[in-house]
């Protein structure tokens, strides 16, 4: 049986500004910032799946004078990472220590205006990605933005994911795949009709 990954230790490269993870984080934060700049709604709701220590969302909100208009839920299974996120969370942001692969983890927090699936699609099997993408309309409000990441390690599966998103009613607004890096960051806007939240499993982490 393969050794179980220590997800708390996995976060350490974020502290190295030259690491790929830190680079990816900066790109994700840039798109989160652009979302808040574009959406001037008095209240915005955010959910983050497998949120880890919440560095992407919380790092942006700490720098924004309008952070008070943002409410949301970070879902993280690892208790140590969840504790870090909880310690850094701003008012209105809650951290739920739970399995983000279960739709029940999002009850009461959706439909959301911003949905983060950062670091998820590279750690689940392809069939679970398809299931998750098809279920995203249950998490999204009208005109919601979804930000996701995925490695482009061969065989590059990102074209398939982008196609599934289009089939689910999402319009691609950005796809960044920096030269010399394997990671990619996608930004899609939901153009369909939200669906009621159901029960069931979206995905299971395989790493």
Image (cartoon, grey):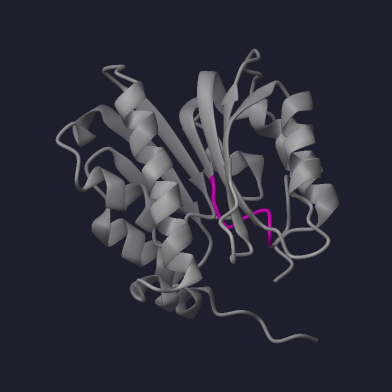
At horizontal 73% and vertical 51% (from top left) the residue drawn is 203
In percent of width and height, residue 5 lies at 61, 79
Does the magenta run of residues contain 118?
yes
The front one of 141 and 60 is 60
Q: Which residue reaches farthest front?
A: 179
Residue 150 x %, y %: 65, 55
* Residue 17, placed above or below residue 145: below
Residue drawn 31% across the image and 17% down it: 41
Q: Quadrant of the N terminus?
A: bottom right
Q: Percent position (x, y) of residue 142?
A: 54, 15
Residue 165 magenta: no
Screen quadrant of the C terminus: bottom right
Residue drawn at x 44%, y 62% as measured from the top left:
23
Q: With 108 as the anchor, is 44 left or right in this view?
A: left
**Residue beneath the point at 59% across and 65% down:** 181
Residues in magenta, as a range: 117-122
Q: Foreground: 20 or 32?
A: 20
**Where is 156 relative to 103, above or below?**
below
Image-based side of 81 in relation to 169, left or right: left
């Amino acid at each position: 049986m393969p050794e179980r990954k220590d997800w708390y230790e996995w976060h350490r490269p974020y502290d190295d500004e030259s690491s790929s993870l830190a680079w990816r984080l900066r790109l994700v934060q840039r798109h989160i910032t652009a979302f808040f700049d574009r959406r001037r709604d008095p209240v915005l709701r955010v959910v983050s799946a497998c949120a880890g220590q919440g560095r992407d969302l919380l790092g942006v909100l700490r720098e924004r004078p309008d952070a008070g208009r943002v409410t949301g839920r970070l879902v993280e299974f690892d208790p140590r990472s969840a504790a870090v996120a909880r310690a850094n969370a701003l008012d209105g942001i809650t951290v739920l220590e739970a399995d983000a692969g279960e739709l029940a983890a999002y009850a009461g927090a959706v439909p959301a205006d911003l949905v983060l699936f950062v670091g998820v699609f590279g750690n689940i099997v392809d069939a679970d990605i398809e299931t998750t993408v098809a279920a995203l309309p249950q998490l999204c409000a009208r005109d919601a933005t979804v930000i996701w990441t995925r490695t482009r390690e061969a065989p590059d599966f990102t074209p398939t994911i982008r196609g599934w998103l289009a089939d689910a009613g999402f319009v691609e607004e950005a796809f960044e795949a920096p030269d010399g890096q394997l990671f990619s960051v996608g930004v899609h806007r939901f153009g369909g009709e939200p669906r009621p939240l159901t029960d069931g499993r979206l995905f299971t982490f395989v790493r």
